[in-house]
């Protein structure tokens, strides 16, 4: 009798385990590709003619494309916002630790001393904080992060684990991410030396373009292994080793690539651009970085196809912020904070950055005003594509306004978790299925200039803190933000100003970027 009962119990337990494993494995794998400083104008789906991006375009054309997607002003707040589900105008929700401390590793400071400096200075996570990776972990996912550091300007393995990543390979220091030939990277807290890379600055080059800087950029001494290549190798191996058909466990991969953030660096110029007489040498190299990113998206897609798991994998492609110029050259292309080619100084009130005024041959901001760090549309509106075979209708275009801080609760709904309370972000998962999602009334974001608010109807109020100027635009009729309507709609200015002030926790300084916490 005992043996019969034991057999029944074991069979029942095995059945339950199989059922749970089956339910877990049927959840979609998720890969989030987070481009760095990629303006949407660089993509074929938005009309780019010089750089062909067929692999990224495939995700847009065979999935859903969000036309009104917002990121943040620049790298660090964008990543914090993405991972926390909170916008970047709050006080004490996140901090930007200073970068560069890992240059002192093993010369001035030990690894433990560096970690202690970061932990003792940066704002710690609250005990009940839930991060993006943890949402997936709670749903039975194995999670991994590859590439650029995921938080602030310096991080530690303890912080990465706290944020919900089972596996990590990449950088711990933002400054080092500006070079593509690191002497070491980190894998699950262990320093991994990269043979042939001996430059402590990771091979970082300078701007603007000159003959001297061109020669330095192509001085390959101490620059052997390009970071994107080794990171991609690790990422593809992770997919292979964590194939849910073998593990019965879905995966979430977060891939914050360095591409195409500058300064410009590429092992070789892509054949598409080598003989293009309309491009300068540095423009050819920059275009090659965008092309490499597209090729790598194709490699990820091909790996999923080869393993026969593409039909149950969600691919998300977006960027942290709008476009930035890394190929400036006297008489050719100017940075947004200098003068236009017409000699006008950008005052960010009446005179603002446009591609045609500064000679941007790529039109990286897709005809919008402004670049990274500003609160113009070109600085914060980003590409956002979701691809999910047989689940998302191909060729769908959504004009629903969404923000990067909506991703956390959107993924929560997709993986079967409750909405995480206390977050600014809301789920737009139903939109992916062709249904009506909850619409947010507005989105807010900070910048080096000041914060801004955009409503679901398309009204935008931007604040230029240095000159205490508020400007109002109606984006559906004014894509380039050329018509300031603040004098015509004073009541709307007052209303939006009050909302924005509350979102900044009643302190305008919270909406001004670049706040750092000293570490060393």
Image (cartoon, helix red, strand yellow):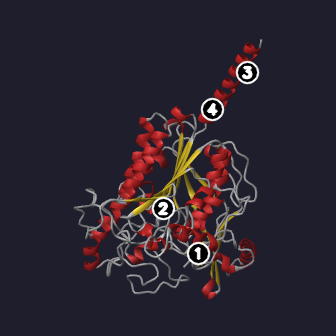
Residue 308 as seen in the image, left or right of residue 230: right
Q: Upstream in the sequence, badge 3 or badge 1?
A: 3
How packed mark 3 is, by other alpha carbons closer than 10 Å (few <14, some 14-19, many 20 or more), is few
Distance Cα–Cα, label 2 vs label 1: 21 Å
> Is 386 located above or below residue 374 in the figure?
above
> Is 170 located above or below residue 336 in the figure?
above
Q: Which residue is mark 2?
A: 148
The residue sitting at 48% across, 84% down in the picture is: 346
Q: Position of residue 6 (x, y in %)?
A: 73, 18
Q: Which residue is mark 3?
A: 9
Q: Upstream in the sequence, badge 4 or badge 3?
A: 3
Residue 280 as seen in the image, left or right of residue 417: left
Residue 259 visible, this angle: no
> Is 80 located above or below residue 462 in the figure?
above
Q: Position of residue 343 (x, y in %)?
A: 40, 87
How packed mark 4 is, by other alpha carbons closer than 10 Å (few <14, some 14-19, many 20 or more), is some
Residue 21 image label: 4
Distance Cα–Cα, label 2 vs label 3: 48 Å
Q: Upstream in the sequence, badge 2 or badge 4?
A: 4
Element type at mark 2: loop
Residue 447 image label: 1
Q: Upstream in the sequence, badge 4 or badge 1?
A: 4
Q: Upstream in the sequence, badge 2 or badge 3?
A: 3
């Amino acid at each position: 009798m005992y043996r019969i009962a034991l057999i029944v119990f074991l069979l029942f337990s095995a059945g339950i385990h199989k059922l749970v494993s089956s339910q877990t494995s049927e959840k979609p794998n998720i890969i989030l590709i987070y481009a760095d400083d990629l303006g949407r104008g660089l993509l074929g789906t938005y009309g780019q003619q010089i750089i062909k991006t067929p692999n990224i375009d495939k995700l847009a054309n065979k999935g859903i494309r969000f036309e009104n997607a917002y990121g943040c002003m620049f790298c660090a707040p964008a990543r914090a916002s993405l991972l926390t589900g909170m916008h970047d105008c709050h006080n004490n929700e996140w901090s930007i630790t200073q970068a560069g401390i890992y240059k002192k590793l093993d010369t001035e400071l030990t690894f433990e001393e560096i970690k202690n400096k970061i932990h003792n200075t940066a704002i710690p996570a609250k005990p009940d904080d839930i991060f993006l990776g943890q949402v997936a972990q709670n749903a039975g996912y194995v999670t991994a992060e590859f590439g650029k550091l995921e938080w602030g300007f310096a991080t530690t393995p303890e912080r990465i684990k706290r944020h919900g990543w089972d596996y990590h390979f990449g950088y711990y220091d933002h400054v080092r991410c500006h070079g593509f030939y690191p002497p070491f990277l980190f894998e699950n807290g262990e320093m991994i030396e990269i043979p042939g890379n001996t430059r402590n600055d990771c091979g970082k080059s300078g701007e603007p373009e000159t003959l001297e800087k061109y020669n330095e950029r192509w001085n390959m001494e101490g620059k052997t292994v390009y970071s994107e290549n080794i990171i991609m190798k690790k990422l593809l191996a992770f997919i292979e080793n964590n194939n849910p058909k073998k593990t019965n466990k879905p995966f979430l991969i977060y891939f914050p690539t360095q591409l195409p953030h500058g300064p410009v660096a590429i092992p070789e110029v892509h054949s598409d651009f080598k003989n293009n007489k309309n491009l300068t040498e540095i423009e050819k190299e920059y275009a090659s970085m965008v092309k490499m990113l597209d090729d790598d998206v194709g490699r990820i897609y091909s790996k999923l196809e080869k393993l026969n798991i593409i039909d149950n994998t969600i691919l998300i492609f977006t960027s942290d912020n709008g476009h930035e110029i890394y190929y400036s050259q006297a008489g050719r292309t100017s940075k947004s904070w200098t003068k236009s080619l017409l000699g006008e100084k950008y005052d960010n009130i009446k005179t603002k950055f446009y591609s045609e005024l500064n000679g941007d041959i790529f039109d990286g901001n897709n005809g919008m005003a402004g670049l990274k760090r500003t609160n113009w549309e070109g600085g914060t509106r980003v590409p956002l594509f979701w691809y999910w075979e047989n689940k998302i209708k191909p060729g769908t275009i959504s004009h629903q306004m969404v923000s990067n801080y909506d991703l956390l609760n959107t993924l929560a709904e997709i993986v079967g978790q409750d909405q995480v309370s206390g977050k600014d972000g809301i789920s737009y998962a139903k939109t992916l299925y062709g249904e009506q999602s909850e619409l947010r009334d507005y989105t807010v974001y900070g910048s080096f200039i000041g914060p801004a608010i955009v409503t679901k109807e398309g009204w935008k109020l931007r604040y230029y803190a240095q000159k205490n100027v508020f400007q109002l635009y109606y984006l559906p009729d004014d894509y380039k933000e050329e018509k300031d309507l603040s004098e015509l709609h004073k009541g709307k200015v007052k209303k939006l100003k009050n909302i924005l002030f509350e979102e900044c926790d009643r302190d305008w300084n919270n909406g001004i970027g670049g706040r750092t916490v000293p570490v060393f």
